[in-house]
Image (spheres, rainbow, N blue to C red):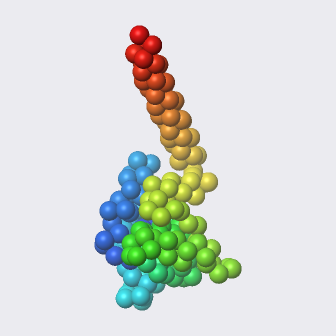
Amino acid sequence: MSEVSLVGIVMGSDSDYPVVEETIKVLDRFKVPYEVKVSSAHRTLERTLSWVKNFESQGGQVIVAAAGLAAHLPGVVAGSTSLPVIGLPIASGSLSGVDALYAIVQMPPGVPVATVGIGAARNAGLLAVQILAAGRESLRSALQAYRRELAEEVERKDSALLAKLREKTAVRNS
């Protein structure tokens, strides 16, 4: 028996995949099972709704919906499930994703969609993991370790920069 996908990732077009791939990397890092689907809120509405219902009935727990331009996909998904939906606006078209951001973040009362920044696929993955971690101590611990790694990286970069500046000052003063 295969592992149940906890996170469903749906995108309106396969052209969104290069961005969505960052979400997948995060889920892989935390060993969270997921499935990926291309389905359009406009061109394949029934297929999209069917996928959402099947994902939910099979034990899925969080959906990341990526879309550009008018970005109706996250809202359509959120309107058809009680699962948490994370909207990932994709930069495209003449407005470079601002239209997608507004379409996702400005949902009507009663149909919330958590929204990350334009192209912020890593944050979409991390938010999905955080939602799942609410009931999973192992994921919560892994997230805490990840945050420590981020802090250590900042400290390393700070130390490296300070060393460069000291070297530069020493050269100027010699």
47 to the left or right of 140: left
Identify which residue is drawn at 35% across, 59% down: 21
Q: Quadrant of the N terminus?
A: bottom left
> Residue 92 versus residue 167: which sits nearer the camera?
167
Identify which residue is drawn at 47% across, 78% down: 71
In percent of width and height, residue 98 lies at 50, 71
Q: Extreme front residue here?
A: 173
User: Can you say whether 118 is above or below 50 in the image?
Assistant: above
> Residue 87 versus residue 160: which sits nearer the camera?
160
Quadrant position of residue 96: bottom left
Quadrant position of residue 131: bottom right
141 to the left or right of 5: right
Q: For the image shown, how many numbered marks are present on the structure?
A: 0
User: Can you say whether 133 is above or below 173 in the image?
Assistant: below
Quadrant position of residue 130: bottom right
Identify which residue is drawn at 61% across, 76% down: 106
In percent of width and height, residue 100 lies at 48, 74
Identify which residue is drawn at 54% across, 78% down: 103
Observer able to see residue 30: yes
In percent of width and height, residue 45 lies at 42, 88
In percent of width and height, residue 119 lies at 44, 62
Observer able to see residue 10: no
User: Can you say whether 55 is above or below 33 in the image?
Assistant: below
Q: In which quarter of the image is the C terminus?
A: top left
Q: Extreme right residue here?
A: 109
